[in-house]
Each structure stands twice: as C-alpha cells, then as structure tokens.
C-alpha cells in the first residue's frame, strides 16, 4: 500500500512540474530545420534496381510533360502574335532552354520520333503498340549506367491542328506553303484530336536517375508551428 502511495505521489509531482513549464521556457535548437535537412541529405540511401526503374519513369514523365507544357505555351503566344509563320520555328520543345536545363540536371537526352515526321531527322520505324495513346510508359535499363524511357505523343490540343491537321480544313493552303518551304519532306499532317503523332524517347544516366529518386523520396521537414 505504501508503495502505491509513493508511486502516486511521484506521478502527481511530475505532472505538476510539467504543467508549470511555459512554452516560452522550452529551448529549441537554432536552425533545427536546416540541420535536419542537411543530415537527411548525408544519409546514404540504398537504391534497389526496381527503385531506379521507378525513378526513370518519374524523371521521364517530369521532363516530357514540362516540354509539352512549354510547347503549348510558346505556340499559343506565337500563333496569336503572328500566326503559323511566327510559330513554325518554335515547334521543337526539345531545344527549349528550360528543357535543356532539366536534361542537364537529370543527365538525360530527350528526342521526339515519328513514322510521319515534319523534320526528316526525327523519322523512326514505330510499332502500332508504341503509338497507342493509352500505352503504359516503357522504361528499361540498357546496361549498368544507361536507362531509357518512352511514351506516345498524343495530339490533345486543338491548337496543334493549325499545323498538323488536315490541309485545306484545319491548315490553310497559304500556311501549308510556309510549312513545305521550311520542311520540304513534311509528312506531319492529317492528324486528328486524340491521335498519337509519335513518341518521346529519353535516355538517362544512372547518376541522374539515382539523384532524382533521392530528391523525390527525401523526407520533407514541415515548418514548426508557432508555440503561441
């Protein structure tokens, strides 16, 4: 019985001491959030082969989606400003500065390929499966240091019909004359909304894939809530 009273008394004393501590009396480590982030970066993370393939898909999606968004933004501006003549030189998102920056960060090279290209240099033999709009992204590891990513390029914006739709209907004969002058071997017309025009192909180095995986899976330290 005496033991029970002593335990109860000790508990009550500890509770009283904790209750007496005000929030402003708690000392926090200076720059604790920055220190936690730095320490997390220093932790050596084990990355499995399956993780690298998953990161290849993440990186490929991130890079090509950014390129597609930039292409739509730039073409919209150029078409509004000067029509097809102004937009035609910019239908090459793989050459945009912001895309190049991402490529260097990810140690990647992105290219567009098509069986019916506008630029003959982008011609490639593609299977029907590769061009299915709902095809799951294809990722592979060619060797210990090189990964590949592939997905279809789908014409999902009516804006693109101004240069890639049906001549005489979506594309004026005057505008198509400009296209043929710039690209004499053009085959990239006659497309409809929802149709695959080609594929994105991305080659990535292991170091870039591993770094992207680390960044994507790194624990984010949430800001500390004010004490009062």
Image: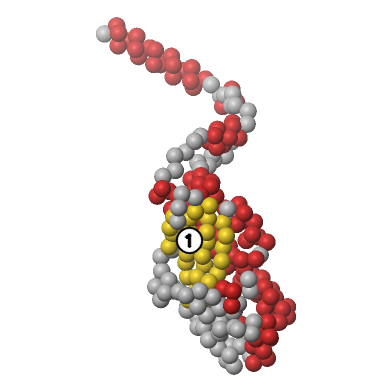
Comparing 5 with 107, the one in front is 107
- Give coordinates of residue 9: x percent, y percent: 38, 12
Quadrant the N terminus occupies: top left
Quadrant the C terminus occupies: top right
**Residue in the image at 58% along x and 90% along y:** 167
Q: Horizontal placement of 214 versus 50: left or right?
A: right
Q: In this picture, is 150 found above or below 3?
A: below
Q: Residue furthest front?
A: 143
Q: Horizontal placement of 78 versus 107: left or right?
A: right
**Residue in the image at 60% along x and 77% along y:** 119
- Give coordinates of residue 123: x percent, y percent: 54, 75
Q: Residue furthest top?
A: 2
Q: Horizontal placement of 50 versus 148: left or right?
A: left
Comparing 103 with 115, the one in front is 115
Residue identifier under label 1 = 149
Q: In terms of secondary structure, where does tag 1 sit?
A: strand
Comparing 195 with 95, the one in front is 95
The image quadrant of residue 32 is top right
- Give coordinates of residue 46: x percent, y percent: 44, 39
């Amino acid at each position: 019985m005496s033991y029970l009273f002593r335990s109860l008394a000790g508990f009550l004393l500890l509770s009283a001491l904790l209750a007496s501590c005000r929030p402003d009396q708690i000392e926090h480590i200076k720059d604790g959030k920055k220190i936690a982030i730095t320490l997390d970066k220093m932790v050596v993370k084990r990355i499995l082969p399956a993780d690298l393939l998953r990161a290849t898909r993440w990186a490929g999606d991130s890079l090509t989606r950014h390129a597609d968004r930039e292409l739509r933004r730039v073409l919209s501006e150029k078409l509004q400003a000067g029509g097809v003549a102004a937009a035609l030189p910019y239908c090459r998102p793989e050459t945009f500065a912001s895309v190049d920056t991402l490529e260097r960060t990810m140690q990647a090279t992105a290219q567009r390929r098509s069986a019916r290209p506008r630029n003959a240099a982008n011609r490639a033999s593609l299977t029907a499966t590769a061009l299915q709009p709902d095809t799951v992204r294809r990722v592979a590891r060619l060797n210990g240091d090189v990964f590949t990513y592939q997905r279809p390029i789908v014409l999902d914006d009516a804006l693109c019909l101004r240069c890639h739709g049906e001549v005489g209907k979506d594309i004026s004969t005057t505008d198509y004359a400009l296209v043929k002058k710039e690209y004499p071997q053009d085959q990239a017309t006659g497309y409809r909304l929802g149709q695959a025009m080609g594929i994105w192909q991305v080659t990535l180095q292991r170091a870039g894939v591993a770094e992207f995986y680390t960044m994507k899976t790194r624990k984010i330290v949430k800001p500390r809530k004010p004490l009062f």
